[in-house]
Amino acid sequence: MQTTAQKLKLIVFEINKEEYAIPVHQVRSIEKLLPITRVPNVAAHIKGVINLRGVITPIVDLRARFNLGESEYSNSTRIIITVVGDLEVGFIVDAANDVLDIMEDDIEMAPEVVGSVETKYVQGVVKVNKRLFVCLDLKEVLQLEHSTD
C-alpha cells in the first residue's frame, strides 16, 4: 500500500533566535516594518493596525504574544501578513529567513516542551538537516485570552 504524502511549503521566520514556520498558503505577503496606529483597550500583544494597500490590518507582536520580552525593532524586523480563517492579520517577527519545501509527513508531534513557546500554539516540529523548526498553529495564536477578573 502506497501513501502519497503531500508536499508542503513553509515560511521560516525568527523570534528570539529560534526558528518557526507557517504554511505558505496562509501567507499573503511579507512586509518591512510599517507605521502602526495604536488601538486603545486591546491586549498588549496587539500593537495596533496598519493600512496596507487600502486594507486595515491588525498587527500582533509574536514576541509579546509568547511572553518573550521586548526587543528593539531592527532592519530585519518584518510583518508577515497572514490569512487565518476570514481574518487578515500581520505578525511582527524578528526576521523572515527562508522558504522550506517539506513533506507533510516530516511534521512530527510537538514534544511536551518546545523552546519557549507554549505547546498549545504549536502544531508540530520539523527537522531539516540539523535545523529544527517549530510549526505554529495561527488559529490558536489568535485565540483571545480568557479573563478572570
Image: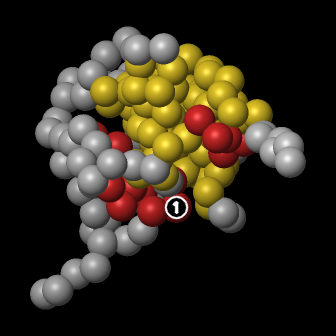
Q: Evaluate whether residue 43 shows in this view.
A: yes
Measuring 66% from the left and 28% from the top, which residue is drawn there? 102
Image coordinates of residue 9 in percent, x first then y, are 69, 31
Image coordinates of residue 98 in percent, x first then y, are 55, 17
The quarter of the rendered structure image containing the C terminus is bottom left
Query: Residue tagged by mark 1?
Result: 139
- Position of 42 relative to 82 (above/below): below
- Position of 23 relative to 112 (above/below): above
Image coordinates of residue 54 in percent, x first then y, are 69, 44
Q: Evaluate whether residue 39 shows in this view.
A: no
**What secondary structure is found at the residue carrying circle 1?**
helix
* Quadrant of residue 41 within the rendered picture: bottom left
Q: From the viewer's perspective, tell me whether residue 60 is left or right of residue 3.
A: left
Task: Characterize the local packing of mark 1: few (<14), some (14-19) or many (20 or more) Cα atoms within 10 angstroms.
Answer: few
- Position of 94 relative to 58 (above/below): above
Image coordinates of residue 34 in percent, x first then y, are 47, 30
Measuring 52% from the left and 61% from the top, which residue is drawn there? 139
* Quadrant of residue 33 within the rendered picture: top left
Frontmost residue, 127 versus 47: 127
Indicate the amino acid at tag 1: Lys
Frontmost residue, 110 versus 65: 110
